[in-house]
Image (tube, coloured by chain):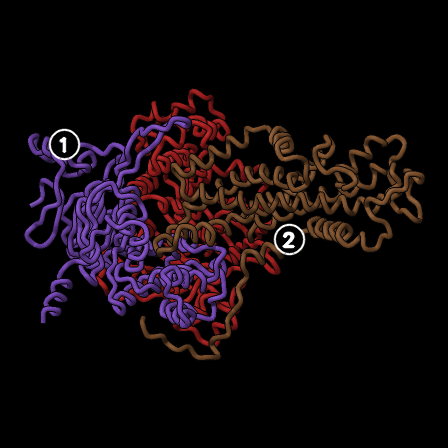
Chain colours: A red, B brown, C purple
Amino acid sequence: MSELLLQVRNLHVHYPVDGGVSRAVDGVSLDVRRGETLAVVGESGSGKSQTMYGVLGLVPRPPGRVFGDGAYFEGEDLLRASERRLRGIRGNRIAMIFQDPMTALNPFLTVERQLTEVLEVHKGLRRKEARNLAIEMLAKVGIPDPERRIDQYPHQFSGGMRQRVMIAMALLCRPSLLVADEPTTALDVTIQAQILELLRATRREMDGSIILITHDLGVVAGNADRIAVMYAGRVVEKGPSREIFESPLHPYTRGLLASVPRLDAEQKAPLVPIPGQPPDPSRLPSGCPFRPRCPAATARCAQEYPPTRSAGPEREVACWVA
Amino acid sequence: MTSTVPVAAPELEEIEGTSLWRDAWRRLKKNRMAVAAAAVLGGIVLFCVAGPLFVPYSFDEQNLEYGARGPSAEHWFGTDLHGRDLLVRTMYGGRISLAVGLAATLVSLTIGVAYGAIAGYFGGRVDAIMMRVVDVLYTLPFMFVVILFLVLFGRSIVLLFVALGAVSWLTMARIVRGQVLSLKQSEFVDAARAAGVRDLAIVFRHLVPNALGPIVVYATLTVPRVMLEEAFLSYLGLGVQPPMASWGLLVSDGANNMMLHPHLLIFPGLLLTLTLFSLNFLGDGLRDALDPRMRT
Amino acid sequence: MLGRVMEEASTARPLVEVEDLRVHFPVYRGTVLKRKAAVVRAVDGVSFAIARGETLGLVGESGCGKSTTGRALMRLVPVTSGNIRFDGEDLLSLRGEVLRRKRRHFQMIFQDPYGSLDPRMTVFDIVAEPLLAHGMGGPDLRDRVQSMLERCGMNPRYIRRYPHEFSGGQRQRVAIARALILEPSFVVCDEPVSALDVSIRAQVLNLLVELQRDLGLTYLFIAHDLAAVRHVSDRIAVMYLGRIVELSPAAEIYRRPAHPYTQALISAVPIPDPRAEADRQRIVLEGDVPSPLAPPRGCRFHPRCPRFASLGAVQKARCREEEPLLRVLGDGRQVACHHVD
C-alpha cells in the first residue's frame, strides 16, 4: 500500500479540571496515507478536534498536557518537535481550515495582507510575487474577480467565500496535509456542496492528504476514503468508508447510522436513537465509555476497556462484543 | 395532558440544583481579599453601630478646658478642640457616612434599576424620552443642584440624603439599560413573551435577575463614591453640621489642625480609607465571582 | 344536530391560515438623526395553511425568512402586511391583554435550548411560568409540572435544578415541556434539533413525533436540515429569499422536486451512504444567496437558476421581469416557477 504521511501513536490530550483530569483524547492511534482523505467522525466532545490540536502543538500548555508514543509526520515526531519547528510546519507542510473562517481570519487586515504574510514567512517571497501567487490561488478556489477582492477585508466576503479564502490560504504553500475541521458546519447546504466540491478538486490536484474532521455522516459518505469513528476520546472503529457504512461493527457506529434521518429513506420510518448522553470526559465510566448507552453491553464491558483489534483487512474495532 | 399521572412517592426525593448565585458565592468565598474585605467591613459597621454603647461619653459632650489631646487611657482616640471624645465621634460619624452611602445606594438600586430596565425593555420612543431625561440630569452640575436644594429648603441632613440619592441612580440606570438591551435579545425573553408572560414580569423576573451581576458590583462601588461626595460636601460646609459628625467632617476638621493635632486626622481618616478599600475589594471580588465568563 | 355540523365545519377548516404575509425590517442609518436607509424584506408574500394535526415543514437556507415566518405566527415580530388566521380568528387584529390570553393556544420551541431557558430559574420555575402567567396555577401546579416533564422524558426529581446542570438534549426536553404545559393546539418548532449532538437528535425528533400523536398537536417545523424535516413533516414548503418556491407533500419533494431550487437543495443534502452518494447527480449552485435588502427583480432565483441558462430569450425575459406565483400542479404540488408543467 502507499506510504504513510502521518502516523499518530497512542496520543493523549489531558486537561486538569476541578478534582480530576479531563481526558479529551485518551490514547488515539491514526494513520494517514499519502493521497487519501481520512474522515475523523465524532460528536462534540469526542476529541476529534483535540486530536489534531495535540498533533500540531495547538493545545494550550499549561493547562493542557499532551503525551503519547509519537506523531510522525514525514518521518519527524511532532510531539517532540520544538515550538519553532512546529511553527515552520504549520501553515506550510500542514495547513488547517476551521469551522468559522471569521474567527480564523484577522478582521483588521485585508485578505491580501493575510495571504501574502503566509508566503513571506514560509517561502520568503517578496510582496509582489506573493501577491500574484495569492491572486492566482484565489482564482483557483473560485473567487470571482480576485484582483479586486484581494484588497477587501474578511467581513466583505460571504460565509462561503470566506471559507474559500481560508482554503486558498491553506493551499498557498502547497501543504502535503490539509486538516479541515468542520469546514462546512457553519454553511448552508448549497454552499456546503460548493465547498465540498472544491475540497474534492483540491485533493486531486494537490497530491496530498486531507483529514476531514466532522460530526456529519452525510459529509463523510461522499468525501472520505477511510473513516475513524471517535467516542469519548478514543477511536472505536476504523476502516474504509464503504465498509463502515455498509457493515458497521461497533455498536456506537451502528447507533449513529440508525439514528440519522436520511433523505432517501422510507418516510416516517422510526429513527432508532442512542439512549442517554455522551459522557463527561472528566468522569468517564469504568471499562468501555460507551457501555452505559450500549444495547449489547456485557459484564466484561464494565471492567476493562476493550483493546483495538483487527476485524478483517484494513478494519479495526475496539469492542468486546462486535 | 389533563389527567395528572401520580408520581410514586419515593421517586419524589428531589435533587437540589446549584444556582448560579450559589456558584458565585462559592467563588467569592475562595477569594481571600474579598473575604478579608467583608470581614473588615463587618467589623467597622459593628464598631460604629454598637461601639457608642461601650464608651462613657456622648458625641456632643464638650470639655473646653480639656481641649484637644492625643490618645490616652480615658480617650483612646484622643479629644478634639472642644474636648469631645474622638472615639465616640468617629463612631457616630461612621454611622452617618455609612447611612448616607447605603441610602444613596438603595435609591440607585430602586429607581436606577427599575428606570433603566423599563427604558431598555420597552425601547423605541419610551427609551428615547426616558434616557434624554437622564442625560439632562447628568449635565446639571452636581454641586449646583445640591447648593440649589440647600438654598431652597434650608440645610438639613434629610436633604443631604435626597441630594446624594437623586444623582446616584443616573449611572445605574444607564448600566441597567445597557444590560437589558442586550439581554432582551435572548431567546428566553422571546420564550417568556410567547408564553404570555406580562411585560413587567419579564422585566423583573427575567431581565433584572440576569443583570444583577453588574448591578451588585456597581452598587458596592456606589457606596464609597457617595461617602466621598458627602465628605466633600461636609468639607465645603454644605453637609452635616457640628455638633453632628460624619467621617468627611471629622477628616476636614482634622486636616485643618493637622500640624498641631495629627490624631484628629489620622483616626477618622484611617477608618474612612479602610472602609473605601474594603468596599472596592469586595466589589472587585463580586465582579469576578459573578462574571459568567469565569464559569468552569 | 346543528352543533355537530358546526363542529365538522370547524375541523375541515385549517387551524392556521397565512395569506400574503410580509415582514419587512427597516434598516436605520445615522447615529443622531436616524433615517430609514433600506428595508430588509425578510418575509415577502408568503401564503400557506396548516390543517389540524398536520406537520408543515419549512425549509430553506439562512436568511430565507423561515424563522421570521415562525416568529410572525407567534406574534413576536411586527408584521408589515398580510393575514394570519388562527382557528378562524384574525390573529393580527389582537392586541394587548387579548393577545396575551390567546397566546396559550400557540407556543414555540426554540433552536438554542441554552439561550431559551433563563439561567437563573429552576426547571420547575421555567415550566410553571406559563401556567402562572395565565392564572392557571392551582394546587396541582407541582403535579402538572412534574407529569409534563416526565412525559417529555425528564426525571421529575430534577425540578429544583438549573439549566446549566443539564446537557443540550435534556435542556431541549425542558423547553418542550414549557411549550406544551399550556396545552396549545399549535406549536412552532424552530430548528429544535440543530443545536444538539447527532446521537441526541433522534431522541428529540422521536419525542416530538410521539407528543404530536398523543396530544393531537399541529406543528410548523422549521429547519435547514431537509432530511430531518422530511422525517417529521406531512407537507414541506421550501423558502428562498422571503418567498415560498415550492409546497408539496413530503413524500413527493424528494422523489419529484418541481422547482429548480428544490432540486438543487435536495441534490446538495449529503446522504450517509457512500453508494447512494456515488450514484447521485449533483447540481451545485453558483454563487451566494442575494441580499434580502435588494432581492433580484422577477424570479428571485433566476440569477442562480441552473435551468435559466437553457431557456430561450423570451422565456428568460419572463424570468427576469415577472415574479412567478405559487400555482397548483395537477397532483397537489404547488410551485412558483414559470417553466414547470
* Residue A277 sits above or below residue B47 on the image: below
**Chain name for mark 2:** B
Give how far across and how far down residue B150 sits, in percent: 65, 33
State the mark number for residue C320: 1
Residue drawn 45% across and 70% down?
A292
Q: Is residue A259 visible?
A: yes
Residue drawn 34% across and 50% down?
A224
* Residue B238 sits above or below residue A314 on the image: above
Judged left or right of residue B287, residue C251 is left
Q: Is residue C263 visible?
A: no
Number of numbered discs present? 2
Report crowding for label 2: few under 14, some 14 to 19, many 20 or more residues within 10 A (C-alpha). many
Report crowding for label 1: few under 14, some 14 to 19, many 20 or more residues within 10 A (C-alpha). some
| Residue placed most toward the observer, C16 or C153 | C16
Quadrant showing the C terminus of chain A: bottom left
Residue drawn 86% across and 49% down?
B57
What's under tag 1, amino acid-wise?
A: Arg
State the mark number for residue B28: 2
Judged left or right of residue C15, residue B63 is right
| Residue placed most toward the observer, B152 or C164 | B152
Residue B263 figure quarter: top right
